[in-house]
Image: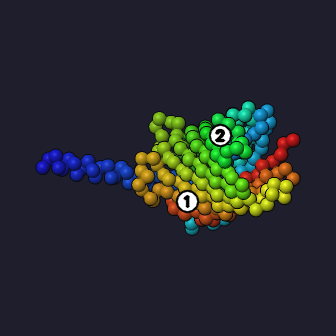
Amino acid sequence: MTAKREFIFGTAIFRIRLAMGSLGLCACAACIAAPEEIQVYLDEFAAPGKFGLDLHTNYVLSAQPGSNTRRMLRVTPELSYGFNENWEGALYWLTSVGPAQLDGHPVTDGVKIRAKWRPRAPTPDSPWYGAINVELGQLSRRFYPDQTSVEIKLIGVYQKGPLTLGANLNLDRALRTDAQQPATAELDTKAAYRITSKNEGDVRLGIENYAFLGALRSWAIPSTRTSSTFLVTDFSFRRWDFNVGLGKASGATPDRWLIKAVIGIPLD
């Protein structure tokens, strides 16, 4: 009888801890806006010895009533450099502005550095491409309570003719030993179809989905998950590259409708 009571008590404690962890994750999800970078990584890579500059932006058009993320704009410049055919590095500067923070004044949300490695460059002989991206961040407490983070991104791409399919598996955790947030996972996917030739602007239409799967230790709890689906277009204009999309978010996030753009700026 005693053993049975201990089992029941232990099970109850486990469920309470799991529920508290889930509530904490949901509370964290409810206090942040869209991520600073809404992008599915494909085969983009800076040329050896060359710099690249991308501007990541997103704006929360609508959110749940009372949310402090409504009308929040996030702007993140990304300066990259190609070390050789296999290695690329980059630096991000995260900023945001919104009516619910500091009387609408722009603020700095932290910095990130990253390194991307690929075994080989894309070739016409194979439609498959893969790479690994690692990011280290020192972030604002408003968006990430643990402030320091590391993310590993596994990149897979299939390109054949006008069709492009891409998937990124993101594994994220805090660098602190006393982390408040658990390790999490996200699966980002993209399907795009080229409707013009490269000489005519290389216009592609597609769908991107960003599925936050929640904590690695509690994937079975649907209430911690979020999903954002964007209708996107990719095109080039006078050596500038654009990825523009309109998205709908659902799940454990206050955001509902968002617009985003990734702008590739020529430096030479």
Work out whether residue 9 can be spotted: yes
Q: Residue at x 70, y 44 (%)?
A: 125
Residue underneath mark 1 = 227
Quarter of the figure with residue 194 = bottom right
Residue type (three-letter) at the residue carrying disc 2? Lys
Camera-side mark, 1 or 2: 1
Q: Which mark is residue 112?
A: 2
Residue type (three-letter) at the residue carrying disc 1? Ser
Left or right: where 211 falls relative to 237: left
Ranked by sequence position, the earlier of labels 1 and 2 is: 2
Give x and y (percent) for residue 216. 45, 47
Q: Residue furthest left?
A: 1
Q: Nearer the viewer, residue 150 or 33?
A: 150
Work out whether residue 93 can be spotted: no
Give x and y (percent) for residue 136. 61, 37
Give x and y (percent) for residue 158. 64, 50
| Colour approach in the figure | rainbow
Q: Residue at x 18, y 50 (%)?
A: 5
Give the CA separation, mark 1 to mark 2: 24 Å
Q: Nearer the viewer, residue 245 or 131?
A: 131
